């Protein structure tokens, strides 16, 4: 029988924020698959998971180019799917580790879709993880939503106009990947009256964690793993 591929969320950064199920799976699988940029040596998700691995657990690095070229991305995912499929065909169980949750803006989704296209019968299980925005809300005691309020997840790569249209209808919002497009994000938040009261967080639950009230100064370049918590102003 073929092995199982686990999409496993390792949480935002602290090894003690993995779920009990995630730890159990990590201690049972034969192989851990770790996605890493072809520009970098390490994998943050692997670093988070490593304290929970058995000494004999095999680790396979999957390289992915930092590019938006669809052909280059497709080639990388095809190679990754071939690597995973070869392991599963041998009956080995593998865990693809990913920061946060495997089903929220995660590289796991691409691997899963590519594998399923090759073999619809591939055995896949998902182990959910704590997200960076949940951890940031906990660190700052920020209420995300209550009663009948809505909570919006918004990628920071969207245009200013798209963000304004989405934010206008959200009680609370989380902007993920809030780094390269920060000027457009800042402008959208200001247009919606949200710029002053938001929380900006980078590298949550890691040694280099930085959390502040309000946005960084204009001209600052925040790190890749940055997010914004925004809650619509309330009147009593």
Image (cartoon, rainbow, N blue to C red):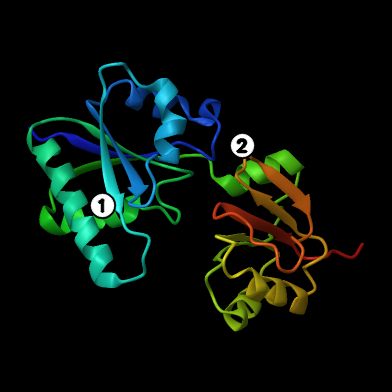
Eyeballing the image, is 24 above or below 5?
A: above
Residue sitting farthest toward the top? 55
Q: Which mark is residue 156?
A: none
Picture quarter with the N terminus: top left
Q: State which quadrant residue 210 falls in.
A: top right
* Residue 168 visible: no
Alpha carbon of mark 1 to alpha carbon of mark 2: how far? 27 Å
Q: Residue at x 22, y 25 (%)?
A: 30
- Residue ranking furthest to the bottom: 161
Q: Nearer the viewer, mark 1 or mark 2?
A: 2
Q: Tell me: 199 left or right of 47.
A: right
Residue 140 shows in the view? yes
> Could you tell whether 154 is left or right of 109 in the image?
right
Seen in the picture, residue 181 relative to 29 is either above or below; the reply is below
Identify the element where label 1 is drawn.
helix
Against 83, is 24 above or below?
A: above
Name the residue located 13 percent from the left edge and 37 percent from the top edge. 88
x, y percent for residue 26: 34, 26
Residue at mark 2: 205
Image-quadrant location for residue 160: bottom right
Quadrant of the frame with the C terminus:
bottom right
Residue with the mark numbered 1: 112
Q: Residues within 10 Å of mark 2 (few under 14, many from 20)?
A: some
Foreground: 168 or 178? 178
Q: Residue at point 13% right, 53% down?
A: 120
Q: Is the Cβ of the residue at disc 1 closer than 8 Å to that at disc 2?
A: no
Expressed as whole percent of the image width and height from the top left, the position of residue 171 reads 71, 65
Which label's residue is closer to the chain start, 1 or 2? Answer: 1
In the picture, measured across the screen, residue 118 lies left or right of residue 56, that is left
Q: Where is residue 116 in the image (x, y as percent from the top left)?
A: 18, 54
């Amino acid at each position: 029988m073929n092995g199982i591929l686990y999409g496993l969320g390792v949480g935002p950064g602290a090894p003690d924020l993995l779920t009990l199920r995630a730890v159990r799976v990590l201690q049972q699988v034969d192989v851990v698959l770790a996605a890493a940029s072809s520009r970098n040596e390490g994998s943050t998700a692997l670093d988070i998971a490593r304290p929970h691995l058995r000494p004999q657990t095999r680790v396979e690095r999957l390289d992915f180019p930092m590019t938006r070229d669809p052909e280059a991305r497709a080639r990388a995912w095809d190679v990754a799917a071939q690597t995973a499929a070869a392991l599963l065909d041998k009956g080995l169980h593998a865990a693809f580790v990913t920061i946060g949750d495997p089903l929220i803006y995660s590289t796991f989704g691409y691997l899963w879709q590519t594998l399923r296209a090759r073999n619809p019968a591939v055995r896949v299980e998902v182990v959910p993880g704590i997200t960076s925005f949940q951890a940031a809300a906990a660190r700052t005691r920020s209420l995300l939503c209550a009663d009948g309020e809505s909570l919006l997840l918004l990628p920071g790569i969207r245009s200013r106009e798209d963000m304004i249209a989405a934010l206008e209808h959200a009680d609370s919002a989380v902007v993920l990947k809030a780094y390269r497009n920060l000027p457009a994000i800042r402008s959208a938040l200001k247009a919606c009256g949200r710029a002053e009261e938001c929380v900006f967080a980078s590298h949550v639950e890691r040694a280099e964690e930085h959390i502040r009230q309000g946005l960084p100064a204009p001209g600052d370049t925040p790190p890749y793993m940055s997010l914004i918590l925004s809650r619509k102003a309330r009147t009593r």
